[in-house]
Amino acid sequence: MPVTREDVLAAIHIAKAVQDVTKLRDDVKLSDQGIDSLEIFNVLLVISEKYDIDIPDEDSDHLNTIKQIVEYLNRRLT
Amino acid sequence: MIGIKAIGTYLPAGRVSNLARLEEFGLTEASLNDRIGFRQVAVKGGDETTLSLAVSAFRNLQDMIGLDLASVDAVAVITQNPDRNIPHLSAELHGKLALSPGCACFDISLGCSGYVYGLSLLSAFMSANGMHCGVLVTSDPYSGIVDPADKNTSLIFGDGATATLLTEDPVYVAGAYNLGTMGSEADNLACNDGKLFMNGRAVFNFAAKYVPADVATTVQKNGLTLAEVDCFILHQGSRYIVDTIADRLGVPHDKAKFYAADYGNTVSSSIPIILAEAMENKSNRSILLSGFGLGFSWASTVLKRLEEH
């Protein structure tokens, strides 16, 4: 089953990165939506644990939006 | 049974304000308070050394309990920033304090996990050798190896020292320990060419992934549940790391506090500085200690307060 934006929003919720994930936009940088670098580390950790994958630094550097994370996961998991 | 009787501490008077550096590093006050957590960091004075910090902590311990120096059988010093590599700092401390020739001294090369490792090492060493009185010293100032322009490290580390008295008449005794290392990741937090390097994401991932499991295992090894532990003293890596570990364990933040906002991450002194105060609270019958960091190593134990105290 493909990864959806809801899956990523669930990870952001678990990481307590924002109060209300429903207000997040898919194509805007998370860092521009009030999520700082430490929280992004946490979100990516939650995702890496959920899908049992390692997300190296060279990949995480390019995961700035929800859309990019969804596309990345679907590439990695197929 | 050998355990902790008292803890002396020393924080140098000097402080560098992180609040004054917000613009330099593009931070807000909220992110400093809620994420990094350290509003200022302690910095030793120009005339202070790793040895002098250790002496000051030791003198504080003496002042607290009137320790007879002639009774000290062993001293172990945890440091990776001695004033010089040879001889070992514990021998220099021995000389400075004019301890007995029969007092055994050795150094332990560990960072943020060092205090908990040191408790296990020194108490086992004392038991094995029939010793009655030992002092575990931490003195590992990072101000000399931190690049002031490095955002990843210069807002975090503070200087400090502690001296923990281990005797056969303790207030707290340690139960089972849990210890480990992920050495393959050690390069992510290392001193290269005299300057500290830290890969923040790797350190965060390590702390968030391995430390909650370590803490849970330690509590279980000691026959307790997380809810039965009165106080969790987690190494003060940053506020966000402390809060994340507490969240992942499901432990309320008021039982796993961030304490170090006014002096910084003092490496191996981080836990005993907090423990010195926590020991004063008699309602802390069980205290979880969790050290983790350099070498991607971890060490935890549970201290139990003896009934007569």
Image (spheres, helix red, strand yellow):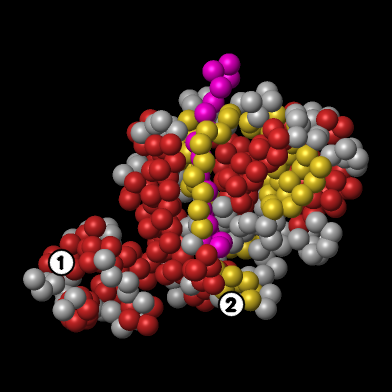
The quarter of the picture where the C terminus of chain B appears is top right
Q: Up-down: is B221 above or below B88?
A: above
In the rendered image, the residue lying farthest to the top is: B308
Foreground residue, A24 or B75?
Answer: B75
Quarter of the view holding residue B28:
bottom left
Q: Up-down: is A26 above or below B165?
A: below
Residue depicted at x 48% and y 39%: B288
Q: Amino acid at mark 2?
A: Ala
Q: Amino acid at mark 1?
A: Asp
Residue depicted at x 73% and y 39%: B135
Would residue B228 appear left or right of B12 to someone viewing this image?
left
In the rendered image, the residue lying farthest to the front is: B128
- Badge 2 sits on which subunit? B
Distance (Cα) linking label 2 and label 1: 38 Å
Label 2 or label 1, whichever lies nearer to me, is 1
Q: Which mark is residue A7?
A: 1
Residue depicted at x 71% and y 62%: B81
In magenta, the rendered stretch is: B292-309
Q: Is residue B246 magenta?
A: no
Residue underneath mark 2:
B149
Position in image of residue B64 (x %, y %): 73, 31
The quarter of the picture where the N terminus of chain B appears is top right
- Badge 1 sits on which subunit? A
Helix, strand, or loop for circle 1?
helix
Circle 2 crowding by C-alpha within 10 Å: few under 14, some 14–19, many from 20: few
Residue depicted at x 83% and y 63%: B86
Q: Are marks 2 and 1 on the same chain?
A: no
